[in-house]
Amino acid sequence: MNKVMSNKAVIALYVLPAFILIVALIYGPILITGYYGLMDWNGIGAMTFVGLENYTQLIKDAQFWQSAYHSFLLAFFSTLSLVPYLAISLILAGKIKGSDLLRKIYLIPMLLSSVAIAQLWVKIYDPNNGMLNSFLTMVGVENPPAWLADTNLVLYAIFVAILWQYAGFYIIIYYAALKGIPESLVEAAKIDGANPVQIAYKIKVPLISGVIKVTVVLAIVGSLKYFDLIYVMTGGGPNGASEVIASYMYKKAFDTFDFGYGSAIAFFLLLITLVVTWITRKLTASEDEIQY
């Protein structure tokens, strides 16, 4: 076997199919998208080369930067939400009664499609018959807001639905990482007199810091390219109040049939995501990863 694997031709033969698939399915479409961004094209007729015109127009597009602000706002709240997710995971991993049932309950949103979740929250936020406004009316709130029609509230109302959708995903990741910590370390800390908060803060969290960094990157990148729930619930409205980069790109490409400009937005989104990911990795990098 060692003789076979030392043969470079054999290694190339093994690697080549996966390499071709990656180039064809990932890097190829990225390059093509960047190329289409240099064109004036309605998606059907002939393409006209316009150089960097779409990209310069994008830089001056106030609506694009507003949608980018909303995407970054979602990334901020998604990252912030990791703190309560981690706290819940620490509690669930602490052998409390009913932790198995609670873990399964938190996973339920992960089993639903984004469209089903969007329809569920649209019903909850319904200004006339929705569960939320019915509750507010019951406790004495007069004229409860029209959550998805109010330009000041709609973005945050959708954020709640998105954070609820991904709660189970991050809780399970943290829970699995916490379960990998040797019990002997926790027992030794207890013998030394550490209380549960000190054990969590000084032992468990540092030991899973690598996993936390990965989830931070996942939360930020996932938020920057988020699309489905927002598009189904509001379509980016009203008046662009809930527009994000991905929904703005979709509208330009498929509603106004400006595929050249839509491709430029998509390629620019990729560049933004790469830069933000690199910055996040730099900010969260540490010289010594804790080993156990």
Image (tube, rainbow, N blue to C red):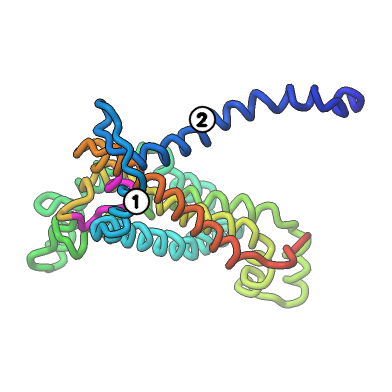
Instruction: Write the residue at 77% across / 72% down.
Output: 191
In this orientation, which residue lies closer to the viewer: 169 or 231? 231
Spot occupied by residue 213 in the image (x, y as percentages of width and height):
59, 59
Q: Is residue 133 shown left or right of residue 156? A: left
Range shown magenta: 240-249
Q: Is residue 80 shown left or right of residue 209? A: left
Q: Which residue is mark 2?
A: 25
In this orientation, which residue lies closer to the viewer: 228 or 91? 228
Label 2 Cα neighbours within 10 Å, binned few <14 / some 14-19 / many ≥20: few
Q: Is residue 115 visible?
A: no
Q: Amino acid at mark 1?
A: Tyr
In this orientation, which residue lies closer to the viewer: 230 or 291? 230
In the figure, residue 49 lies in which quadrant? top left
Instruction: Write the residue at 58% across / 53% down.
Output: 175
In the figure, residue 10 lies in which quadrant? top right
Q: Is residue 146 shown left or right of residue 195? A: left
Is there CB contact under 8 Å for labels 1 and 2?
no
Q: Which residue is mark 1?
A: 55
Which of the image's four quarters has the N terminus?
Answer: top right
| Magenta segment includes 241 | yes
Q: Under tag 1, what secondary structure?
A: helix
Spot occupied by residue 178 in the image (x, y as percentages of width and height):
64, 56
Spot occupied by residue 282 in the image (x, y as percentages of width and height):
60, 64
Which of the image's four quarters has the C terminus?
Answer: bottom right
Q: Relative to 10, does residue 242 appear above or below in the rendering?
A: below
Which residue is outermost to the bottom? 193
Q: Amino acid at mark 2?
A: Leu
